[in-house]
Amino acid sequence: MRLPRTCSINHRAVFARVKNSGQSKAGRFVILSTLPDLELPTIRTGFITTKRAAKKAHDRVLLRRRFRSLVQKYAPDFPEIRRYLVTIARQGAATATFAELEADWVKQARRLGLLVPRPDSKP
C-alpha cells in the first residue's frame, strides 16, 4: 500500500483534535495518537518531527520516511482503517535503528488496539 497525498493530515486543527480528543500512547522513541472518525474514507496520517527529536533536517526527513513506511506496512492490518493517526518522534528517535523504531511503533499500536496479535507470531 502506498500512501497517497490525500491520506495526509494538513491542518493544525486536526492535529489539535487528535491530541485533545484521541488516545495516545508513549514509547521510548515515538508517541502514537489516534482518533476514529467514521466519516473518513480511509486513514489520514501525520508525522511530527521537531528539532528536539533530531537537530538536522536530514534526520527529521529520514524519520518521516521511516514512519511513513511503518504506516504503509501495518495500516492494512488495522481492524478499522477510518481514523486519524499521528506519530510524534521523541528525543533520541534519530539515533535509533529502523528495527528499534519499528518495534516501538508496533508496541504502541498494539497498546492502542490498532494491531491485534497474530496467532502465528511470537508474543
Image (cartoon, rainbow, N blue to C red):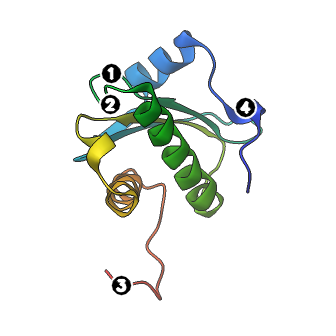
Q: Which element is circle 3 on?
A: loop
**In the rendered structure, which disc, 3 or 1, sits on the residue that comes first in sequence?**
1
Query: From where the camera sits, is residue 26 visible?
Result: no
Quadrant for the C terminus, please.
bottom left
The location of residue 60, given as percent across then percent down, is: 43, 32
Q: Which element is circle 4 on?
A: loop
Q: Are marks 1 and 2 in contact (CB under 8 Å)?
A: yes
Q: Nearer the viewer, residue 85 or 83?
A: 85
**In the rendered structure, which disc, 1 or 4, sits on the residue that comes first in sequence?**
4
Instruction: Give the Cα separation between the discs numbered 3 and 4.
Output: 35 Å
Q: Which residue is mark 2?
A: 54
Q: Nearer the viewer, mark 1 or mark 4?
A: 1
Q: Nearer the viewer, mark 2 or mark 4?
A: 2
The location of residue 57, given as percent across then percent down, is: 44, 26
Residue, x 34% and y 52% (percent of image)? 108
Instruction: Give the Cα separation between the discs numbered 2 and 4.
Output: 35 Å
Give the amino acid at mark 1.
Lys
The location of residue 101, given as percent across then percent down, is: 36, 54
The location of residue 117, given as percent across then percent down, is: 43, 73
Instruction: Give the Cα separation between the discs numbered 1 and 4.
Output: 34 Å
Q: Nearer the viewer, mark 3 or mark 4?
A: 3
Residue, x 48% and y 55% (percent of image)? 114
Q: Residues within 10 Å of mark 3 (few under 14, many from 20)?
A: few
Give the amino acid at mark 4.
Glu
Q: Residues within 10 Å of mark 1 (few under 14, many from 20)?
A: some
Judge from the rendering whether residue 45 lies leftward or rightward of residue 101; answer left or right: right
- Mark drawn on residue 51: 1
- Mark drawn on residue 39: 4
Judge from the rendering whether residue 28 lies leftward or rightward of residue 111; answer left or right: left
